Image (spheres, rainbow, N blue to C red):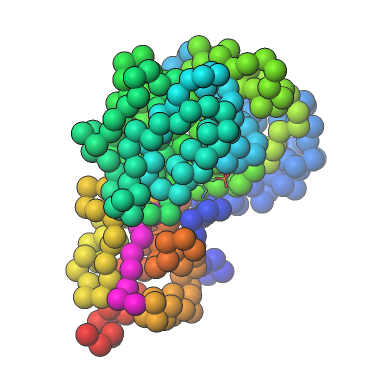
Amino acid sequence: MSDRIFNFGAGPGVLPESVLKEAQRDLWNIAGSGIGICEHSHRGKVFDKVINEAEQVCRDLAGIPGNYKVLFLQGGASLQFAMAPMNLLPKGGTADYLVTGVWSEKAVKEAKLFGTVHEAATGKGSKFTRIPAAADIKYSPSPAYVHFTSNNTIYGTQWRSEPAPPSGVPLLCDASSDIYSRPIDLSKYGLIYAGAQKNLGPSGVVLAVIRDDLVERAPKDLPVMLQYRTAVAERSLYNTPPTFGIYMMGLVFKWIRDTGGLAAMAERNEAKAKLLYDALDESKHFTVPAEAGSRSLMNVCFRGPGEEMENRFIAEATKRGFEGLKGHRSAGGMRASIYNAMPRAGVEALVAFIREFDKKEPR
Ligand code: PMP
């Protein structure tokens, strides 16, 4: 019998059980070295293999082209909100942002510290319940880059495919909550980054993939740690990196590979999300604020008829072993995060509970 429950938290989120078991073993003694993963030097042979394999499998999964660098950074996705404009928004330049939620707004706020921001589209008017259509996007005349958030963790919306920036303009993406949940063509991106703690591993490490030609755009008077070129030149080992986080990411990449790769992830994620959205759509009491074409496959946000019933739902769910269902404090309601590692059985159990609760509830 497992003593684990179903964790629908938005992040740090659920990790694959096989990965956790392997990590348990390697915490004690990795690769027969007699030393645990957290105790190895970041410059030693054991960790060298760990980071090389993590990068290689990361590359293989998405077929990352050779002119892209894979980086393991620190400071969370939040530091990328600042690093991206620091490095890529030249003095006097304008960067275009597609604003689809709180995280995009935070990215805008940081970018404004370094240059002019043009909001090429914003979903604020529709309470971030939908992803802008191509016709809603108005780019500035010559942006330094276009930035978007591929999945909005708080509002439960997700881009079906990348926005198309004006020709020659680099596309930047915060993919914190849906990276590697589906196939991705990285050649469309100038820079993509993601905090690990949802689909890739524990918190404390950020995956960033950057196109070669952008690396040298940064002014050289930035703090060394805040220049992408430092991480590129030192292969993410300028200072002591989050070794355990990188190790875990490597295990998660291998788990994705060994369970079918990104296409299989997408297939499973679509099926899981459909189970949940169908149950909510068929229910008498629950509603999904996100518009049909914009619904996230990662964070399923839903509401009840009132706060009293929502609180009761969350309390009963918790008693039944479903954790992390409370919506973000800024959005309210409920949110079921069903990242790659959430097993279908977890979603099926939650769906059964939703149906039972809905039936019991008086009209
Ligand atoms: N972007 C998105 C889409 C997120 O969901 C989050 C965290 N929930 C962040 C950025 C911030 O990430 P971090 O906490 O790693 O800075």
The tally of labels here is 0
Left or right of 253? Residue 150 is: left
Above or below, comparing residue 70 to residue 74 in the picture: above
Residue at 56%, 53% in the rendered image: 12
Q: Is residue 194 visible?
A: no
Residue at 21%, 75% in the rendered image: 284
Provide residue 208's location: percent of width, then percent of height.
54, 30
Residue at 64%, 22% in the rendered image: 227
Residue 9 part of the magenta-drawn span: no
Above or below, comparing residue 91 to residue 10 in the picture: above
Residue at 59%, 26% in the rendered image: 86
State the extent of the magenta-drawn residues as a range.
299-306
Above or below, comparing residue 64 to residue 79 in the picture: above
User: Between 84 and 30, which is closer to the camera in this rendering?
Assistant: 84
User: Between 241 and 3, which is closer to the camera in this rendering?
Assistant: 241
Provide residue 339's location: percent of width, then percent of height.
43, 51
Q: Is residue 120 visible?
A: yes
Left or right of 20? Residue 155 is: left
Provide residue 81's location: percent of width, then percent of height.
54, 36
Residue 302 part of the magenta-drawn span: yes
User: Between 73 and 276, which is closer to the camera in this rendering?
Assistant: 73
Provide residue 83's location: percent of width, then percent of height.
59, 30
Q: Quadrant of the C terminus?
A: bottom left
Left or right of 43? Residue 345 is: left
**Residue 257, quarter of picture:** top left
**Residue 166, quarter of picture:** top left
User: Between 9 and 6, which is closer to the camera in this rendering?
Assistant: 9
